[in-house]
Amino acid sequence: MTHANIVVLTGAGVSAESGIDTFRDAGGLWERHRVEDVATPEAFERDPDLVLRFYDMRREAIQAKQPNAAHFALAKLERAWPGDVLIVTQNIDDLHERAGARRVLHMHGEHLNAWCTACDARPRWTGPLIGRPPCPECGERMLRPDVVWFGEIPYRMDEIFAALREAHMFVSIGTSGAVYPAAGFVRTARDLGAATLELNLEPSQGTLWFDEARHGPATQVVPAWVEEMLAQAGE
Ligand code: OAD
């Protein structure tokens, strides 16, 4: 196990202590906004200003947030672990990268990218989209947030399943297990023989699928787990 390949799946809980709201906790984003109003292709068709404003506000907010001890610990694991570590995140913030992680797959897209539906360019984007700025590639005013909405297909699925096939360990951090396909990764990893571990504030919806679950805030349980792994690797 000491040189094992590890796939880490993260969700909103890993960024909660950086001050970014989760979706389904009390006071979470989906309590204040209806998914069908702001996070579907139909919503964008119906009321693009509402959707663009929602993502513009969040894009601005995340840029003022900082990575926390859980993000830093995962970046350290990636650097120091003798096997492969892949972080698959459902988060659209860039806090894993800002903590120093290099192998991060954003299966639900990225806040700091726009997507031009005219020419398919995906330019980095830190400002607002509400004013319909032109695409830097083709000049059309058809930019939308490069995020996966409900009813759309998550990104990088082939790479994710390839990594799950090679994984000896699958660790799920800060995700409620409510949204597929990510919620199903634990069963895939398990069926393929990986050890499975959940690190979450409380038992997730899929907690029974894991070999082991440790509950507590990510800034505590993640660094503790990483130190444990690195101590084992050094033995
Ligand atoms: P959720 O809001 O559904 O779940 C967050 C999980 O993090 C919950 O299980 C919390 O108990 C846990 N949590 C909260 N604070 C924590 C902390 N400090 N430390 C550790 N865990 C904590 O968020 P996700 O599971 O990420 O998709 O949601 C999955 C997807 O649903 C999102 O990517 C988004 C959303 O709708 C799209 O927008 C497509």
Image (spheres, rainbow, N blue to C red):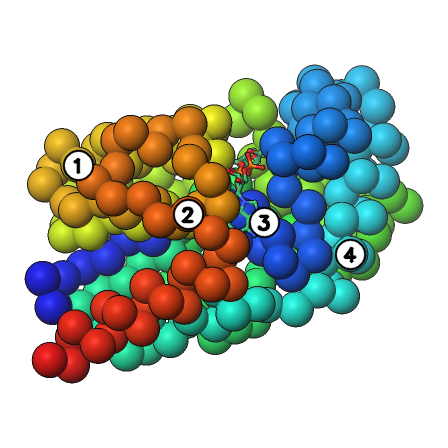
Quadrant in the picture for residue 79: bottom left
Q: Is mark 2 within 8 Å of ligand 1?
A: no
Q: Earlier in the sequence, mark 4 or mark 3?
A: 4
Please state which of the two labelled residues, at mark 1 or mark 4, is closer to the viewer.
1
Q: Is mark 1 within 8 Å of ligand 1?
A: no
Distance (Cα) linking label 2 and label 4: 28 Å
Amino acid type of the residue that numbered disc 1 sits on in the rendered structure: Arg
Question: Going 42% across and 36% down the picture, which residue do you hit?
Answer: 203
Question: Going 11% across and 80% down the picture, which residue do you hit?
Answer: 235
Q: Label 3: which residue?
A: 92
Question: Going 58% across and 49% down the picture, which residue do you hit?
Answer: 92
Does residue 128 appear left or right of residue 207 in this picture?
right
Q: Earlier in the sequence, mark 1 or mark 4?
A: 4
In this rendered view, identify the residue nearer to me: 129 or 22: 22
Amino acid type of the residue that numbered disc 4 sits on in the rendered structure: Ala
Quadrant in the picture for residue 77: bottom left
Quadrant in the picture for residue 35: top right
Distance (Cα) linking label 4 and label 3: 12 Å
